[in-house]
Image (cartoon, grey):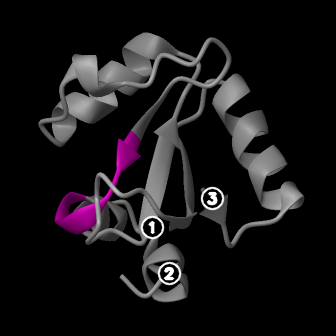
Amino acid sequence: MAFGIDRKELRAWQKKVLAGEIAFLTHYWLDERFPKSTSVTKVGCSDLEKLIQWGETYQLKRKWIDMDPKYPHYDLFGSIQKEILKKEGQIDQIIRFNL
């Protein structure tokens, strides 16, 4: 279940992904498989090779990409989520989602 973002933020992320940009979207998220995580960051890009190369920078495996037909993305949570957001200068998302 996702919450904590509005339609405008979602649409902006989708637009960037479709334009071939590396785009970040963090939202609150609850999943019983990951009880210690309260948020997830989706890092997407429609240029799959660009997304793969970006992921390799952080030792993310290609097989971890959610191969959504329009919005392929990595799902980041836990310590790697915060580490990558910090390295990518996404401090506002760290603060907003209390990471």
* Distance CA(mark 2)–CA(mark 1): 7 Å
Q: Quadrant of residue 65?
A: top left
The residue that label 2 is drawn on is 97
> Which amino acid lies under the numbered mark 3 shown in the image of this protein?
Ala
Left or right: where 9 falls relative to 64:
right
Between 35 and 65, the residue placed more toward the observer is 35
Q: Quadrant of residue 8?
A: bottom right
* Distance CA(mark 3)–CA(mark 2): 13 Å
* Image quarter (top left, top right, bottom left or bottom right) of the N terminus: bottom right
Q: Residue at x 46, y 69 (%)?
A: 90
Q: Is residue 1 above or below residue 37?
A: above
Mark toward the viewer: 3 or 2: 3
> Which amino acid lies under the numbered mark 2 shown in the image of this protein?
Phe
Point out the residue furthest to the right here: 8
**Magenta segment boundaries in residue numbering:** 75-80
Neighbour class for label 2 at 10 Å: few (<14), some, many (≥20)?
Answer: some
Image coords of residue 48 (percent x, y): 45, 14
Mark toward the viewer: 2 or 1: 1
Q: Residue at x 53, y 80 (%)?
A: 92
The residue that label 3 is drawn on is 2
Between 59 and 5, the residue placed more toward the observer is 5
Provide the secondary structure element on which disc 1 rests.
Answer: strand
- Tell me which label, 3 or 2, sits earlier in the chain: 3
- Tell me which label, 2 or 1, sits earlier in the chain: 1
The residue that label 1 is drawn on is 39
Image coords of residue 56 (percent x, y): 19, 29
Q: Is residue 84 above or below residue 60?
A: below
Image coords of residue 26 (percent x, y): 54, 62
